[in-house]
Image: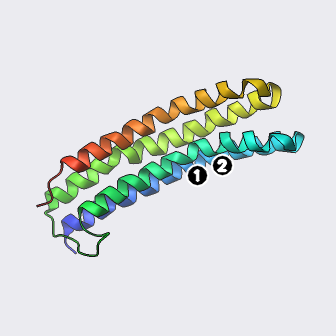
Amino acid sequence: MGIGLALAVVGAALAVGMAGTGSAIGMGLAGQAGSGVVSEDPEKFGKVLLLDALPGTQGIYGFLGAVLVLQKIGLLGGDAVEISTGVGLALLFACLPIAIAGLSSGIYQGKVSAAGMGVLAKKPEEMGKAIILSAMVETYAVIGLLATILLVNGINVE
């Protein structure tokens, strides 16, 4: 495996690792708050689960970005192409938008979801507002994923 290929794999690993870390932290924060709500009113578990799941999407977006890179360099088909160091660096940098946006938005979406658990506990009829506030943070993970997709698709590996 050449340096270019290794750099591309590092980019894919960062996309999954950083975005997944953001999701894990965010879901952990929301889950802690949600556990308190469920301990007081077990009937709210379904709504708590929804708010807890929202920060989990960043990890999925990071995985998607990684799959696009691995597909582009042929690792998913078992026939990796030899790429230059410059192309490998370009693919690594192309993964950074979803890696960074996924990490930060996952954490902050978890914080907003955790705060939304308070809304759910006190005014369950306002649950939709808590979901919307949490989903707004995700907008930036989606933008990070779109940037990664555009960048990866714009890189010629030949």
Residue sitting at x 32%, y 61%: 10
Q: Are marks 1 and 2 in contact (CB under 8 Å)?
A: yes
Figure quadrant of residue 50: top right
Disc sitting over residue 24 in the figure: 1
Label 1 packing within 10 angstroms: few (<14), some (14-19), many (20+): many
Q: Is residue 125 above or below residue 47?
A: above
The amino acid pointed to by label 2 is: Gly
Location of residue 115 with respect to 87 vertically, above or below = above
In terms of depth relative to the viewer, which is nearer, 87 or 77? 77
Q: Which mark is residue 28?
A: 2
Residue 65 position, x and y percent, is 36, 52
Question: Which structural element holds mark 1?
Answer: helix
Task: Tell me the CA gap for discs 1 and 2.
Answer: 6 Å
Quadrant showing the C terminus: bottom left
Q: Residue at x 24, y 60 (%)?
A: 72
x, y percent for residue 86: 14, 56
Image side of residue 74 versus residue 136, left or right: left
Label disc, if present, on residue 63 of the rendered structure:
none
